[in-house]
Amino acid sequence: MSTTRHLVNRRRRLATVTATNAPARTSSAPEPATGAAEAAEAAGPSEAHEPPEDPEGDADPDAQADGEASDEAAGDVRPPRRIPRLRIRLPAVLCAATVLLGAFAAWAFSSAATLREDPTRQNTALTDISRTSEVKGQISEAVGAVFSYTYASPGKSDLAAQKYLTGKAVQQHKDMLAEVRAQAPKQKLVLTTTVTESGVELLDGDRARLLVFADQSNTRTGKEEETTYAAAMFAVDAVRRGDTWRIAAIDTFAR
Amino acid sequence: MARVRTTRNPLVVAAIVLAVAAAGAAGWGGWERYEATHDDAAAYAGARDEALAAGEQAVQNMNTLDHAKVEQGLDSWEESTTGDLHKQLVDGRDAFVEQIEAARTVSTAEILSGAVTELDDRAGKAGVMVALRVTVTAPEGKPAVKESRMLGQLTRTSEGWKLSALGQAPVGNTAG
């Protein structure tokens, strides 16, 4: 097939070359002595004249072309056969490779992105050890500070609230401590909160959610000293501002 | 020979450039994907989420029991546990069945929140804390609702994570 196609093309080429490029060719090596180099040279300019013909070579019905090849030297047939074949195949192969590789690249990137966007991965609780212990430590300290209250120095609690609370948590904290504040001076109340367990449910950049178990001791130091203990559990939404984690919301699981 | 090069079809040159670029992109993409699938942190995160899901389910099972379906309930308790805890449940089963059938209570549990506190992926050990709301309904009177702070230890078995220890978080003098 390719032999036929090639020869037909070559005949056309030679025809065009003699018609248009004759002066140029006379300067090159004498025609009868054509070798591979000459054939390649001839093939070069031909492309400019008839590029669409090459890929459609199959359509040529002229099967007898083989016989007419005897016009040229027998050795002339082989090398040109290889070069145009490469010429025809190369773009096709390159296109196919580009499409396949491109498709693979697109799949690989999107698949990698999907994997990375998985909520399990986005949540770096425990996987990011230093951040996890940082938020646990700071939030435990914050919870202890804002939920502790001494009748003798009520300002300390306000200061703690300013330091550790932000957003919705400010009002929530105010509401939670309202009763304690009201009774504190009369009963000489000392409320102490200690976090006994905390776990990071979610950690995503500067946001986190923690589950907190805390013990609260409530001491009345009025006439008779009396201490009651209470168990507390709640979840805390935390945000990181600068280097410190603050409590942004408190979820007491109220129904 | 040189002339062959210079006269080469620009389309072919462009095709080569595109193919090389596509090969580069494919290599990069392949590497990205390989990295994404062979990410230790991701595997650890996966284990964490599995442990939490199994832990929450197990804690819920262990706080759910209907006197009318005691056997079924206790089967689920035994399925949720392993090790010493499992052994205790199996050993104490008969006595417990009697107790529950006498009390005729129905307990249901709702998970409020849960977190993994520690995870040793290699050893297959994990610690979970679970905030729970348990409703106990006796034949007479109003249902009692209590909130419960549970701490559990999980051990990985061939059938997934199971509870090997479970208890209430202690309350008291720590805040003295």
Image (tube, coloured by chain):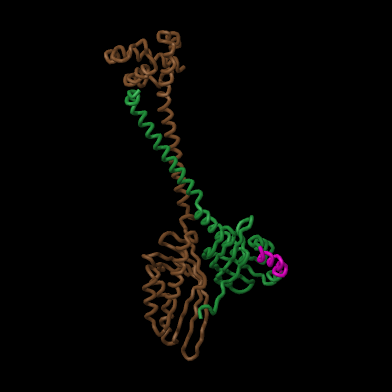
Residue B115, percent from left and from top = 52, 64
**Residue at point 63% right, 68% down?**
B106
Q: Which residues are magenta?
A: B83-97
The answer to whether one can see residue A255 in this image is no
Residue A101 sits in quarter: top left
Q: Which chain is brown?
A: A
B118, above or below A91, in the image: below
Residue A127 located left or right of residue B60: left
A72, above or below A207, in the image: above
Residue A190 sits in quarter: bottom left
Q: Residue furthest left?
A: A23
Could you say which is closer to the camera, residue B101 or residue B117? B117
**Residue at point 43% right, 69% down?**
A138
In the rendered image of the structure, the colour used to display chain B is green
Residue B26 sits in quarter: top left
Residue A92, percent from left and from top = 42, 27
A86, above or below A249, in the image: above
Residue A120, percent from left and from top = 49, 55
Residue B76, percent from left and from top = 65, 61
Q: Which secondary structure is most common in the magenta stretch?
A: helix
Residue A120 located left or right of residue A48: right
The answer to whether one can see residue B15 in this image is yes
A12, above or below A135, in the image: above
